Image: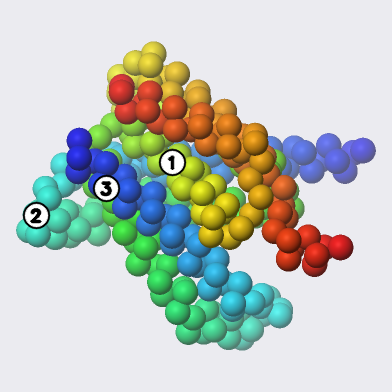
Amino acid sequence: MMHVAVFLCFLIFGSTGGEIAITRGMKATGEPERLRPRELLRFLRRALCNGWFWAGVPLMALSFYALLVLLSWEPISFVIPASALSYVVGTFGAKYILGEEVSAARWIGVVMVCAGVALVALG
Amino acid sequence: MATEGRLRIKTLAMVCAMVLCANAGDLMLKRAMLQIGAVELSVPGISHAFRMTVTNGTLWVGIIFLCGFMLSYMTVLSWADYSYVMPAGAFGYALLTFFAVVFLHETVSPRRWAGVVLICVGVMLVGQTKPRTTAEAREALA
């Protein structure tokens, strides 16, 4: 059970960390001015030169492989609902890293997701 | 009024496509990992599993479905609010559990079903958020 918990952490923190890093990278890259092939290539080159983008890609890859390993061990009816814990990590990240306001309803949602995952894990 | 109705139908259709693609992708990944077998936690075990995943056709079909999910997700977000799309997509957890029972013949206890329902409602609540809450963003909007 311990290795399942460890790979669940890889899945959740990998996907949340990867999304945050890629979002930062894409925000720094800016929007393509026009949707023309040359402009899109320039946009892609700018994105590929961004450090945040390259921090995000391995994290997303780690999260995907953690998902595959978990699926090889556990039923999908456990793995996918348990991956909803990323909303919990995302809410804490939004509050304490990005300084966003988190409503009471959202905190209630976080508690419900945690309780739901606990029930799913108990089987 | 007619435009609003059309937009509602278009959004609903795209959310359904998003949920179905995500669920089909995840089911295909599970099927591929059933073909490959349990991954052994050792260097040869992990490298063998890596080689098997790269060459497994079912897994690539799953990845195509997941690309379809990303495409429909990004498309629907280009016109609909995140706080509408997110809760609407939350029922995907329940649908996936149902598909796991039907297609993969997994046994799901009443306790696990209760957990899935709690997760769906919880994700709906987490998705109900204001688009801008930081002080800088509020100033930029003012």
Q: Nearer the viewer, mark 3 or mark 2?
A: 3
Tags 1 and 3 touching, CB below 8 Å: no
Find disc 2 in the rendering and name its residue: B42
Q: Which amino acid does label 3 sit on?
A: Phe
Q: Which residue lies furthest to the top in this view?
A: B110
Tell me residue A47's x, y (percent): 52, 79
Q: Residue at x 49, y 81 (%)?
A: A50
| Nearer to the camera, A94 or B3 | A94
Tell me residue B10's x, y (percent): 73, 42
Is A9 on the left-hand or right-hand side of B48?
A: right
Q: Which amino acid does label 2 sit on?
A: Ser
Tell me residue B124's x, y (percent): 60, 34
Mark 2 residue crowding within 10 angstroms, few (<14) / some (14–19) / many (20+): few
Is A66 on the left-hand or right-hand side of B22?
A: left
Q: Which chain carries label 2?
A: B
Q: For the N terminus of chain B, which image quadrant?
A: top right
Tags 2 and 1 touching, CB below 8 Å: no
Q: Residue at x 46, y 48 (%)?
A: A89
Find disc 3 in the rendering and name its residue: A7
| Nearer to the camera, B71 or A22 | A22
In three-dimensional space, the C-alpha distance between marks 1 and 3, rounded to whole angstroms, equals: 13 Å
Q: Circle 1 sits in a helix, a strand or a loop, which is it?
A: helix
Q: Which residue is drawn at 39% across and 13% down?
A: B110
Tell me residue A62's x, y (percent): 31, 59
Q: Quadrant of residue A73?
A: top left
Q: Which residue lies furthest to the right in this view?
A: B1
Q: Circle 3 sits in a helix, a strand or a loop, which is it?
A: helix
Q: Which amino acid does label 1 sit on?
A: Leu
Q: Circle 2 sits in a helix, a strand or a loop, which is it?
A: loop
Find disc 1 in the rendering and name its residue: A85
Q: Residue at x 20, y 35 (%)?
A: A1
Q: Mark 3 lies on which chain?
A: A
